Amino acid sequence: MKTNSKNKILIVDDHLLFSQSLELLIKSFGDYEVTERFENGKVFIDYIEENKSAEIDLILLDVNMPVLDGLSTMKWLKDYRPDLKVIALSVNDDEEIIIKMITNGAKGYLLKDTSPEIFKEAIECVIEKGFYFTELVSGMLINKVNSSDKKINLKEKEIVFIKHACTEMTYKEIASEMCLSPKTIDGYRESLFDKLEIKTRIGLVLYAIKHKIVFV
Amino acid sequence: MKTNSKNKILIVDDHLLFSQSLELLIKSFGDYEVTERFENGKVFIDYIEENKSAEIDLILLDVNMPVLDGLSTMKWLKDYRPDLKVIALSVNDDEEIIIKMITNGAKGYLLKDTSPEIFKEAIECVIEKGFYFTELVSGMLINKVNSSDKKINLKEKEIVFIKHACTEMTYKEIASEMCLSPKTIDGYRESLFDKLEIKTRIGLVLYAIKHKIVFV
DNA sequence: ATAAAAAAGGGGATATTTCCCCTTGTCACA
DNA sequence: TGTGACAAGGGGAAATATCCCCTTTTTTAT
């Protein structure tokens, strides 16, 4: 017989301490084994591509990782391996990212302060029923479908501009930094003020920080 | 015999999944046992106060926790139980907080993405030699002693002004809000730009957020 | 194929921010 | 009793930011 009866779980998490100890916890549940661990989305995807027929019952995917983050990895899986089941793990309960992970195919979303009991339940549930959502997440999903989500989608150049606007540079300096005319920058600014319903550069800075476009 | 020979470790971390699995990892090292786990500084301190003679060889203290955070807990330990050895654990490498944890008595500071090997080494080192610092942390310490940390102390009115400056109000509006002449506000602004070594209101906003004068 | 957006840029005006140098009164303190 | 620090306020100018209305070119969608 080629395979044993234990469910095969993969962990993708850059926190080595966490992923290694999580493996021990999972092993202690009895019915599961951790067959591989990866420290970011990149090396995980490399593995998936080179082992197309590997048996995988569940993937535990950290959201915050260097190199290739959880969301990007999730998007890749959605395109190339929608058959794989993923539970997203994260320390934060940012609605934006939770919704995105789920709309990109995550079957569950757990905060890292989840109790081991709930964690075990979630693993069992996803492997058996195909999904597991906590009240927190369900609440968000309901919220989302009920709210006219005029979602702001910022283009790459706008993001770059915003990052620069969150410094002490003048618009003229930003323009030369981005190799654009000051007037173009002025256009970006006006369009953003409009989109984000703000009136000043200060408002833009506050928005950027609140929405984690820039970090302080 | 009342005690066994294993080193007794306490874990203080709100991420149950992390702390429970960390316990398994520590157990796997062989020479250690985790005698208690706490989900925040408050319940940890309650325990310490009620069990003054408990044998404790090492405390693993998470920095980011609800109710009572790692730094506050560290300060309490400094005052009441400086004999206890602590390794701070955190996901971020913010210099500010690292320095504060160490100046308040932490014997080590590990990022949560530390490898289990280094982690084991750190535990052994702190219990035996009394301290363990990674290169990252040593670098910061050296940095700190070499830089004259002129600490800024802000007056109440300045704080109020800063809070207002972190909104979309103009200085004129701020002045009327604070019942002061716009020229006085201009004076506050200039004096702050000077003190904080910034050149624009954007810089002031970034400073305010970084130093938690305003929250986003 | 063509109309509608979007991206890049411009003119010109007004409001706000930033800067430098100044006056007046108050309060501590040596 | 003077002196120096400091809070409050001012004049005036230059630099920036904000606003509104415009053209050209490229993309996108139907």
Image: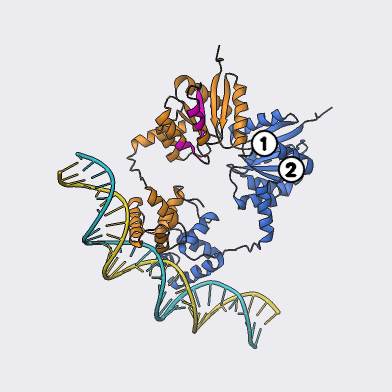
Chain colours: A orange, B blue, C yellow, D cyan
Query: Marks 2 and 1: CB-CB under 8 Å?
Result: no
Indicate whether B110 appears above or below B159: above
Work out whether residue B168 can be spotted. no
Which is more toward the observer, A28 or A197? Answer: A28
Chain to which mark 1 belongs:
B
Which is more toward the observer, A125 or A146? Answer: A125
Give the percent coordinates (x, y) of residue A156. Answer: 39, 48
Give the percent coordinates (x, y) of residue A141. Answer: 40, 33
Work out whether residue B47 can be spotted. yes
Q: Amino acid at mark 2?
A: Lys
Residue drawn at (49%, 68%) of the image: B189
Quarter where residue B87 is shown: top right
- Which one is earlier in the sequence, the residue at label 2 or at label 1? 1
Q: Which residue is mark 1?
A: B11
Residue drawn at (42%, 40%) of the image: A96
Q: Which residues are magenta?
A: A46-72
Query: What numbered label is drawn on residue B85?
Result: 2
